[in-house]
């Protein structure tokens, strides 16, 4: 009973994943990453959430942008622009090495899991980081302009077109990452933590991989989510905008818990949202959920684990 399985998207998820990695003993954390944001660009296989997690847990993340690597240079992008290449998706020089090497290994027949495992080991990360599936799943958004691939909507169009629908193309055929499934069925899970990631496009693609939701529910450990919404607002990114457009209601911490439904045993909400806790089915713990400092990441990780342990007891 010592393994913590965390479900994560990119920025918000990686903050809590880092906190978990620092408060848990070595070998006790497995992070399952969303790959619905993955795409092929300039001939490269890009996995934004996996990379955000790897960079954050290795201490290589860029605190200014929230994506990419710190101490980045941009010679490649400048040279690409000179040649009239596509520059809407920014790839720094150091970051580029990740995509080039991943693409080479995938073409040589390695799985995305194997590549990710090797990268995280080489960068000194002790937590395991695995994609939800080695099969391609691609998030697509139905907008007033028709269906858009996720990164085209998110980066190229800067989340502008209103979202009317979401599809996870390929999810129906995707097989869950085998080690994730084995970990969930091995009887040694202490807690499943759903990180404060965008429920609609970071967590739900993971849950859409056939078998994963059932395996999480069936693993015998408490499932605890941390709210990505604080005081009715997303800390960063399009969660609130999408929520309003797609669901026709204001986003709220309680609304997120209701969306996860019977998956949750526990829910960590911000102290600012205490009034919303009333009537929620999962057991609620109130905490300060804004993670600006490392200490705040660790404190929130402890709050989520404490809630899970109290549910087990
Ligand atoms: P993406 O894949 O890069 O969009 O990242 P995620 O889906 O993992 O994270 C986006 C979500 O993280 C947004 O809904 C934010 O509100 C949430 N988020 C970001 N920082 C924080 C934080 O410090 N605390 C909490 N509670 N949520 C956060």
Image (tube, rainbow, N blue to C red):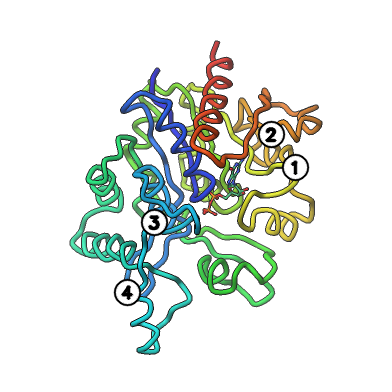
Q: Which mark sits nearer the N-terminus, 2 or 3?
A: 3
Residue at the image point whose x is 28% and y is 45% from the top: 120
The foreground one among 29 and 176 is: 29
Q: Residues within 10 Å of mark 4 (few under 14, many from 20)?
A: few
- In the image shown, does 21 or 151 lie closer to the viewer? 21
Q: Earlier in the sequence, mark 3 or mark 4?
A: 4
Farthest-out residue, front: 71
Hey, which residue is sitting farthest left in the picture?
A: 108
Tag 4 and tag 1, C-beta contact below 8 Å: no
Question: Is disc 1 placed on a helix, strand or loop?
Answer: loop
Could you give the CA–CA distance between mark 4 and mark 1, rounded to whole angstroms?
Answer: 41 Å
Some atom of ligand 1 lies within 8 Å of the CB belonging to the residue at label 1: no
Q: From this viewpoint, which residue is outermost toward the bottom?
A: 83
Looking at the image, is mark 4 or mark 1 earlier in the sequence?
4
Along the line of sight, the residue nearer the viewer: 203 or 25: 25
Q: CA distance from mark 2 to mark 3?
A: 29 Å
Percent x, y of residue 93: 32, 68
* Secondary structure of residue under mark 2: strand
- Identify residue for label 3: 70
**Height in image: 147 above or below 224?**
below
Q: Give the spatial CA distance, label 1 vs label 3.
A: 30 Å
Whole-percent x, y for residue 220 in the image:
48, 21
Q: Which residue is mark 4?
A: 43
Q: Position of residue 45 (x, y in %)?
A: 34, 65
Left/right of residue 201 with respect to residue 275 in the rendered view: left
Q: Where the C terminus falls, by quadrant?
A: top right
For disc 1, the marked residue is: 231
For the residues labelled 3 and 4, say whether their Cβ atoms are less than 8 Å apart.
no
Decide if ligand 1 comes within 8 Å of the CB at mark 2: yes
What mark, if any, has residue 270 been given in the picture? Answer: 2
């Amino acid at each position: 009973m010592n393994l913590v399985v965390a479900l994560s998207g990119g920025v918000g998820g990686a903050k809590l994943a880092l906190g978990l990695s620092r408060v848990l003993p070595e070998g006790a954390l497995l992070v399952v990453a969303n790959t619905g944001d993955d795409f092929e660009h300039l001939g490269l296989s890009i996995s934004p959430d996996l990379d955000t997690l790897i960079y954050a847990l290795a201490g290589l993340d860029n605190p200014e942008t929230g994506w990419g690597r710190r101490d980045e240079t941009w010679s490649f992008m400048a040279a690409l622009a000179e040649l009239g290449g596509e520059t809407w998706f920014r790839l720094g020089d150091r970051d580029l090495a990740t995509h080039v090497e991943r693409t080479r290994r995938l073409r040589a027949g390695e799985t995305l899991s194997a590549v990710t495992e090797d990268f995280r080991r080489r960068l000194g990360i002790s937590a395991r980081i695995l994609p939800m599936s080695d099969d391609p799943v691609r998030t697509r958004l139905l907008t007033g302009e028709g269906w858009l691939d996720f990164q085209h909507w998110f980066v190229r169009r800067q989340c502008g077109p209103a979202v009317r629908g979401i599809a996870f193309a390929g999810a129906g055929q995707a097989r869950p990452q085998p080690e994730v499934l084995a970990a969930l069925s091995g009887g040694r899970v202490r807690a499943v933590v759903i990180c404060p990631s965008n429920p609609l496009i970071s967590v739900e693609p993971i849950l859409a991989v056939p078998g994963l939701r059932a395996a999480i529910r069936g693993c015998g450990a408490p499932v605890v989510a941390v709210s990505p919404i604080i005081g009715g607002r997303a800390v960063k990114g399009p969660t609130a905008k999408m929520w309003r457009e797609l669901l026709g209601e204001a986003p709220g911490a309680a609304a997120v818990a209701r969306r996860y439904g019977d998956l949750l045993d526990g829910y960590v909400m911000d102290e600012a949202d205490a009034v919303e806790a009333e009537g929620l089915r999962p057991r609620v713990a109130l905490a300060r959920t804004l993670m600006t400092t490392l200490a705040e990441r660790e404190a929130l990780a402890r709050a989520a684990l404490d809630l899970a342990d109290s549910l087990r007891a």
